[in-house]
Structures are given as structure tokens and as C-alpha cells.
Image: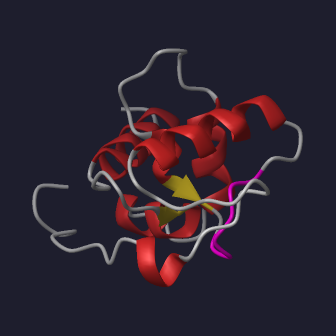
Amino acid sequence: MEERQAFREAVCRAVARVPKGTVASYGQIAWMAGYPRRPRQVGMVLKGLPEGTDLPWHRIVSVKGYVPSRGRWWGAMLQIQRLREEGVEVDDAGNLDLGRFGWTGAGVGEGL
């Protein structure tokens, strides 16, 4: 399998494991996928997902606890809305409390 495709599939599997009502960082997903130095590429994979995907891309945020909006304000607003629907408290600027809503990665090694 081509490395790019293997990376994409590993990222999607990791994102799919993030439970409803929690968030993970791009770096955390990169680590879970087996590519610890590729958080930016995780963002690129998520950006390239087809519209209407079932993958919970909205649960992935920056390591500093905010929904990135640079160059994608409409997408950030949708992400904030989806997180709020799951009970994650996000302010209008996209900031959230990682200590409260950050996923610890419980069960990470199981079935990835």
C-alpha cells in the first residue's frame, strides 16, 4: 500500500476512536496513527474528507484547545456547532477546556 494511503487510513482509524463529547489534538491523532511528527498532515487529511462523511473530524482540535479557523471560518463554525451538540463547551472564538473535554486516549492500543 502506498505510504500516503496508509497514513490516511491510520489517521481515519484514530479519529474514529475519539468518543462523543470529547476532543483530541492533531498531534495526539498523529501519535495514535503511528506518525508522531505529522500533526499538520493530520489536518490535511481531515480537510480533504468528503462532505457528509461519518468520520467525527469535528472532535479534533489544536493542542492549545481551540478550533482552528484560519482560512476556514465556515468550517470552524460547523465544527463548533457539532462540538456543542455533543456537550463540549466551546466559546464563540473556538476556545475550549482540554482539561475537561480532552480525551485521554483510553484504549488506544486496542484494535488500532
Magenta run includes residue 67: yes
Task: Pick the residue in front: 5 or 91.
Answer: 91
Magenta run includes residue 66: yes
Residue 73 occupies quadrant? top right
Pick the quarter of the image with the N terminus: top left
Q: From the viewer's perspective, tell me whether residue 10 is left or right of residue 17.
A: right
Q: From the viewer's perspective, tell me whether residue 52 is left or right of residue 69.
A: left
Query: Furthest-bottom residue in view?
Result: 99
Task: Pick the residue in front: 105 or 83.
Answer: 83
Q: How is the image coloured?
A: secondary structure
Residue 66: % across, % down: 68, 64
Residue 78 occupies quadrant? top right
Location of residue 44 with respect to 90 vertically, above or below = above
Span shown in magenta: 63-68
Pick the quarter of the image with the C terminus: bottom left
Query: Furthest-right residue in view?
Result: 71
